Image: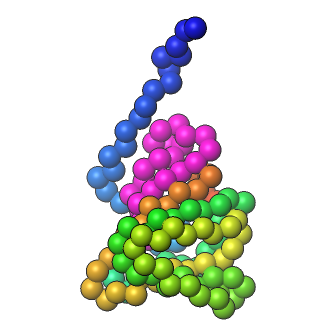
Amino acid sequence: MSLDLSKKVVTVRPDQTIVTKQNLPYYVGISTATTGAKGLSMNLVVIPPGGSPKAHFHKDFETAIYLLKGRVETKFGENLKESIINEEGDFIFIPPGVPHKPMNLSDGEPALAIVSRNDPNEHENVVAYEV
């Protein structure tokens, strides 16, 4: 048995955010660009106090979220008529193509979440959703 030395463990330590199509600051962690990932992405998203991104959906890809800090209301579905409130420690699943718009319910503290998708180029597959 021989080892393929081109396969290695990669560490990513992002030191700055990017602004996404959703208009939220992201610390890009795992993606095609940072690690060569072929089937997933994982990032840290910051929702500023009282902040909310643009309504959007992710074309053909599932989203898993772990809310690290804060309280967030997510409006979702057709015309964003449905709503759920999540608190730190919650795991959240959003199916492909479901429009959603989270909002940080705190006026003083940012909300922090780990976001993972089965899409290594996830920022290219974000679609704006007009209500």
Residue 127 seen in the figure: no
Is 53 or 78 nearer to us in this picture?
78
Question: What x and y, as percent, mark residue 33?
Answer: 50, 43
Residue lying farthest top? 1
Question: What x and y, as percent, mark residue 41?
Answer: 53, 51
In the shown orientation, is residue 3 left or right of residue 124?
left
Q: Looking at the figure, which quarter contains the C terminus? A: bottom right
Is residue 73 in the magenta section? no
Residue lying farthest bottom? 81
Q: Is residue 120 above or below residue 36?
A: below
**Residue at 35%, 72% in the rendered image:** 69
**Residue at 48%, 79% in the rendered image:** 86
**Residue at 61%, 74% in the rendered image:** 56
| Colour scheme of the picture | rainbow
Highlighted magenta segment, given as a residue range: 24-45
**Residue at 69%, 82% in the rendered image:** 77
